[in-house]
Image: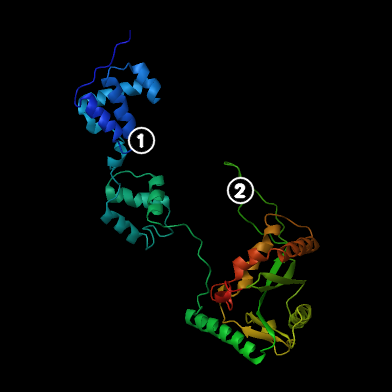
Amino acid sequence: MPKRISITPHLNTDELGQRYRQAQTVIERSHFQIIWLLAQGKRTEEVAEVTGYSRSWIYELVRDYNHHGPECLGDGRRDNPGATPLLNDEQQAMLSQVLRDPPPDGGLWNGRKVADYLSDLLDKSISRQQGWVYLRQLEWRLRVPRPQHQETDPEVQDAWKKQLTEEVTQVKKDYPDAVVETWCEDEHRIGLCPVTRRIWVEAGDVPTANVNWKREWLWLYGFVEPQTGETYWWILPYVRTDLFSLVLKDFAEHFGVGDNKRIVLPLDQAGWHMSGKLDVPEGIHLVPMPPYSPELQPAERLWPLVNEVLANEAFDTIDQVEELVFQRCQRLFQQKDLIQGLTFYHWWPGYDDRDAA
């Protein structure tokens, strides 16, 4: 007959049974059940079958109980303080402050440079991975800065946002019976020169892309109404005042602009937009944007979507590019929700009314 395990009588069987029934967690309940059953004279095989624990694990639990008593039973993880942090609060604050300035060698901070700084601070070797870990713990993130012209004036931009809203309000007041919409327009140059994008590949694979360095171009004229995500497109070989007049005329006719529909159209101050020779159809109200402010132009968000079909591809003729871009614009006509999400800025006229709509 198998030998029964000896249980040190820190608690009698009645006390063990009571602790088993009063246990607050599943783990604590299982531990006291095992010791209680063994204290009643049950064999290890029986206890293992009842509780689902292996005999070797039960032996370890009994050894701990016999040596330390009932305090060792239950889930000890909640009382485990874990490993001592590499940096104390003061050192973490120092690191956070240091990261706000360029690294000692100039250039940019990365995991290796953070690890080098920590190695000097703590006088011991710190792995590059640990440098990344602390960058993440301090809630620093790797981001590509949004380009901003050095002559951009934020105060002028804020004033223009208010001006745009006032312009829309004034048009609605002047034409109370007309539908008033706020669109915007921009142009994008596309051609045979390559557009490269990052792509997903298997680990160890180095992707390549064939390119053609010929200098042939087309211009894509893009209109978007951010509030709805609706778009309208023209592909032309140039940007000129006479061509832009033609585009505006077609746009106005297509959307029925006139007495019963007015469109406020913000756009940048390119020469062909501001020319005195520009023929602006009745019902279109141009609103020039401040200089050096592409970030105010929602239509700028369209161009990465267009470029996707050209990315990492080589083309022999500009006609091939035009056909792909045409097909892409046809698809973007249908993706209003996507475009609305990209272009409907929080300060754009109508944004505060979106829930009511």
Residue drawn at (28%, 14%) of the image: 4
Q: Amino acid at mark 2?
A: Trp
Quadrant of residue 184 in the image? bottom right
Q: Residue 179: x percent and y percent?
A: 69, 83
State the residue in front, 147 or 65.
65
The answer to whether 236 is drawn above or below residue 15 in the figure is: below
| Mark 1 element type | helix
**Residue positioned most to the left:** 10
Nearer to us of marks 2 and 1 is 1
Figure label count: 2
Q: Residue 323: x percent and y percent?
A: 79, 62
Q: What colouring style does the render use?
A: rainbow
The residue carrying mark 2 is: 200
| Residue 65 appears in the figure | yes
Label 1 near label 2: C-beta < 8 Å?
Answer: no
The residue carrying mark 1 is: 26
Quadrant placement of the N terminus: top left
Q: Residue 295: x percent and y percent?
A: 56, 73
Give the CA separation, mark 2 to mark 1.
45 Å
State the residue in front, 192 or 53.
53
96 horizontally vs 66: left or right: right
Residue 18's label in the rendered image is: none
Residue drawn at (80%, 63%) of the image: 319
| Mark 2 element type | loop
First-in-chain label (2 vs 1): 1
| Residue 303 appears in the figure | no
Quadrant placement of the C terminus: bottom right
Q: Amino acid at mark 1?
A: Val
The answer to whether 290 is drawn above or below residue 300 in the figure is: below
Badge 2: residue crowd in 10 Å (few <14, some 14–19, many ≥20)? few
